[in-house]
Amino acid sequence: MVTTGLGAGLDDLTLNTIWAALEDTSTLVFLHPHYGLPSSMYGLYVTGHGHVLPLALSFPTETRTAIGRIF
């Protein structure tokens, strides 16, 4: 499951049936960051460094934020 859910976050009410089915079957869910922050957030340093900064900084933050919205 990507951290954006169906585009409105993991707390989107349309996901309730999915969460219920996953809970009923005790299915483990792997959350994967989807987009992270826009590259403009990293300034000039992102050039030449590939996707190192987005992976190191925004993906963990995006995942924590997505999980936090569920509770």
Image (cartoon, rainbow, N blue to C red):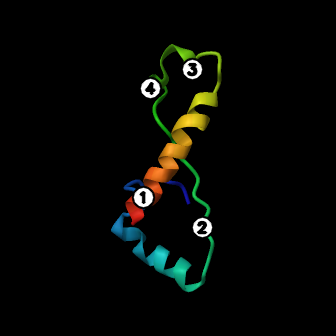
Mark 4 to mark 2: distance in Å? Answer: 29 Å
Location of mark 3 (residue):
46
The residue where tag 4 is placed is 41
- Report the residue at 49% width, 27% height from top: 39
Identity of the residue drawn at 48% across and 74% down: 18
Relative vertical location of residue 44 with respect to residue 65 in this rendering, above or below: above
* Labels 1, 4: front one: 1
Which one is earlier in the sequence, the residue at label 4 or at label 2?
2
Q: Earlier in the sequence, mark 1 or mark 4?
A: 4
Q: Residues within 10 Å of mark 2 (few under 14, many from 20)?
A: few
The answer to which quarter of the image holds residue 69 is bottom left
Image location of residue 67, percent across then percent down:
47, 59
> Between marks 1 and 3, how big is the CA–CA gap?
28 Å
- Badge 1 amino acid: Gly
Q: Are discs 4 and 2 less than 8 Å apart at CB?
A: no
Q: Do residues under tags 1 and 3 come within 8 Å of each other at their CB atoms?
A: no
Rendered-image quadrant of the C terminus:
bottom left
Judged from the image, the secondary structure of the residue bearing numbered disc 4 is helix
- The answer to whether any part of residue 31 appears in the image is yes
